[in-house]
Image (cartoon, rainbow, N blue to C red):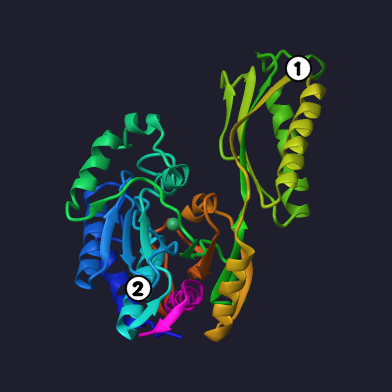
Amino acid sequence: MIEIDGNRLNGRLETFAAIGATQKGGVNRQALTEGDRRARRLLAELAWTRGFSVFQDPMANLFIRRAGRDESLLPLVIGSHLDSQPAGGRFDGALGTLSAFEVLESLEDAGVETERPIVVVAWTNEEGCRFAPGCMGSMAFSAGEIPAEWQRKLATDGVSFAAELTATIESLPRAKMIPLGFPIHAYLEVHIEQGPSLEASNIPIGVVGGIQGTRWLDVTVSGQTAHAGTTGLGYRRDPLRALTSALSNLYERIMPADPDARFTIGRISVEPGSVNAIPEEARCTVDIRHPDPSRLDELEQLVSSTIAKEAEGQRCSVVLSRSFDMPPCTFSADLQNAIERAAADKGFKSARTLSGAFHDALFVNRVAPASMIFVPCRNGLSHNEAEFVEPGHAVAGCEVLAQAVVVIAGKTDR
Ligand SMILES: [Zn+2]
């Protein structure tokens, strides 16, 4: 076992939280901004001080490498991201990146060599709020290429993605450039849970089995616009009546019957939107999520047939199309077992869990075994300036990571 320095970790979290600090105690350090560059520079300088090598790739993913005893072995990669939401918290991303760096420093302090090289990573633009999509860095890394259309993207503040990416890479001239993507042995990421389960059950470590799948649908129900006062019940072809009946039915049938299912209507609109006319069209978006791909198909089928039935009752027509489809991801069973054992070795209670949100680990999992270690956050709150992780829980996540790293990367005392 190696000992991590919990005070150093919590001190670092404070130091990085000061970069882009907001009035309400959160951070605004959106991807590829000057704040993001300052955080990357600080991490690179800390790495150089310890004698580690620092690299970046054409997506500005930042890598810090500690050599292994056998340099022919593939590296174990650990990390997360440093960018934040505009009104983000101090821990989302920073906790995983700084925990990974703490592990590297603790190995150095203890004079422990590992068989494999270990690489700490800070992925670019996990949040996706300034430039969509999220997880750009890990997505491009695992695909081995940057999609051409990304170069033409503009930020929400009007700045070009290509220019900001170049400026970010150039802000670290000492970091050696490497090509996009390299073979890796395995990937581990510490992250705040961003949900209430661990805190509610008083368990400090979540062993993440995978990330649920997400499917988005666009629904348009078309009827006939007509006078609100003169059109009797038998003459109405009301698309909103059909849609609201269908949705109310789906709210009753999906989530209450299946605790793993998520069903959300986030946007709804009617045309022409007149106070005294039956609408011509009613539209909504549907967001369904589930860890089981066959259940996702069943849920989509249920949404589609329920809306079709209600529309038929109103003599309306329906057009339903998928606008997004992210299959569920299952993390490596070996890595989950390794995390569970590491937690037990360190004397922490752990529980198997699934992630409701996307993470960089989802994309890395496409090219190498990956898994995640979750720690509780207060009231399940994240993407919020009030996001808070107990210092003891931050240390617990880092200790479990360190223990798993020592086992997976193989330890030899110097
Ligand atoms: Zn995150």
Answer whether residue 22 is visible to the viewer in this image.
no
Q: Is residue 124 above or below residue 49?
A: above
Location of residue 60 in the rendering, given as x and y in whole percent from the top left corner:
30, 48
Q: Position of residue 144 (x, y in %)?
A: 43, 42
Image quadrant where residue 129 sits? top left
* 139 is higher (above) or lower (below) than 70: above
Q: Amino acid at mark 1?
A: Arg
Residue at figure coordinates x 78%, y 21% from the top left: 314
Magenta span includes 408: yes
Residue at x-position 33% and y-position 69%: 67
Foreground pick, 124 / 146: 146
In percent of width and height, residue 166 lies at 23, 41
Query: Which residue is rendered at x = 61% and y = 67% of the image?
Result: 334
| Identity of the residue drawn at 47% across and 42% down | 143
Residue 149 is left or right of residue 267, and the answer is left
Crowding around mark 1 (Cα neighbors within 10 Å: few <14, some 14 to 19, many 20+) is some
Kind of residue at badge 2? Leu
The circle on residue 104 is 2
Q: CA distance from mark 1 to mark 2?
A: 69 Å
Res 239 visible:
yes
Please state the horizontal and vertical placement of residue 10, each as a whole percent of the image. Answer: 33, 76
Q: Is mark 2 within 8 Å of ligand 1?
A: no
Q: Secondary structure at mark 1?
A: loop
Is disc 1's CB within 8 Å of ligand 1?
no
Left or right, 27 with respect to 373, comes to: left
- Which quarter of the rendered image does ligand 1 occupy? bottom left
Point out which mark residue 236 bears.
Answer: 1
- Marker count (numbered): 2
User: Bounds of the magenta span?
Assistant: 395-414
Q: Nearer the viewer, residue 325 or 202?
A: 325
